[in-house]
Image: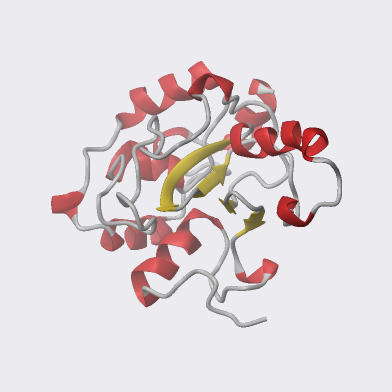
């Protein structure tokens, strides 16, 4: 898994190789977060240490953002506490931190409302745990058990997911319910330019 993720991770330090962060996206990300409310960037040594510890490579542009721009900001897309640091979990996180495994693939590729799933809860509970804990970093919370995840392993690597106590759904216009572009840069841009709820398209 580490090799697979490394192959897809691109160049270090915003290099010019395949997978390097887009300069325009980084400029937009830098402009979106007020410097006086940002935590210091983690640095490339810190990012690579995190990646080695978890057997993954973070997707761009989030990878370069955390390394060079900031590692969390109190003013950010998530409603409660903004964008949290890479190694943090929200204060209201209800799952055991030891259960999380970033190298295992995020299990979903389409929305799943487990509240409406007809199977017994005992059958789907392990699957729900995997959605929360496999293949993603947690970016922040909107409260009431609603979390924003960036997928770092699996088919949806680089995409943002909203996971709540009733289900999970991918973020981006291609998936419906929002006019925003997918991915970390699209998620931030939607917040920075509109300040509208992410579900801004009526279906």
Residue 133, relative to residue 62: is it above or below? Answer: above
Is the image coloured rainbow, by chain, by secondary structure, or in one colour? secondary structure
Determine the residue located farthest toward the left in the rendered image: 36
Q: Quadrant of residue 78?
A: bottom left
Question: Which residue is nearer to you in this view: 27 or 53?
Answer: 53
On the picture, is 116 further left or further right than 30? right
- Which residue is depicted at the point 64% across and 44% down? 157
Q: Position of residue 176 (x, y in %)?
A: 67, 72
The image quadrant where one finds the N terminus is: top right
- Which residue is depicted at the point 34% across and 37% down? 85
Question: Which residue is nearer to you in this view: 150 or 93?
Answer: 93
Residue 146, relative to residue 127: is it above or below? Answer: below
On the picture, is 198 further left or further right than 81? right
On the picture, is 114 further left or further right than 86? right
The image quadrant where one finds the C terminus is: bottom right
Residue 164, relative to residue 39: is it above or below? Answer: below
Viewer can see residue 97: yes
Q: Position of residue 52 (x, y in %)?
A: 50, 18
Question: Which residue is nearer to you in this view: 152 or 5?
Answer: 152
Question: Which residue is nearer to you in this view: 158 or 91?
Answer: 91
Q: Quadrant of residue 139?
A: top left
């Amino acid at each position: 898994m580490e090799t697979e993720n490394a192959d897809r991770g691109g160049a270090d330090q915003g290099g010019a190789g395949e997978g390097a962060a887009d300069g325009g996206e980084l400029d937009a990300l830098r402009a979106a977060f007020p410097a006086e409310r940002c935590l210091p960037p983690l640095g490339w040594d810190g990012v690579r240490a995190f990646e080695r510890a978890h057997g993954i490579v973070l997707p761009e542009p989030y990878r370069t953002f955390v390394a060079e721009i900031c590692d969390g900001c109190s003013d950010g897309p998530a409603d409660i506490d903004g964008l949290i640091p890479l190694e943090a979990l929200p204060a209201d996180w209800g799952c055991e931190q030891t259960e999380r495994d970033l190298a295992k693939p995020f299990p979903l590729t389409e929305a799943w409302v487990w509240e409406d799933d007809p199977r017994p809860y005992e059958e789907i509970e392990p699957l729900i745990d995997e959605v929360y804990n496999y293949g993603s970093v947690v970016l922040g919370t909107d409260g009431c058990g609603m979390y924003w995840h960036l997928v770092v392993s699996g088919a949806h690597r680089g995409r943002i997911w909203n996971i709540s106590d009733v289900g999970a759904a991918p973020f981006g216009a291609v998936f419906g319910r929002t006019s925003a572009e997918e991915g970390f840069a699209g998620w931030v841009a939607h917040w920075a330019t509109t300040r509208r709820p992410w579900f801004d398209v009526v279906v």
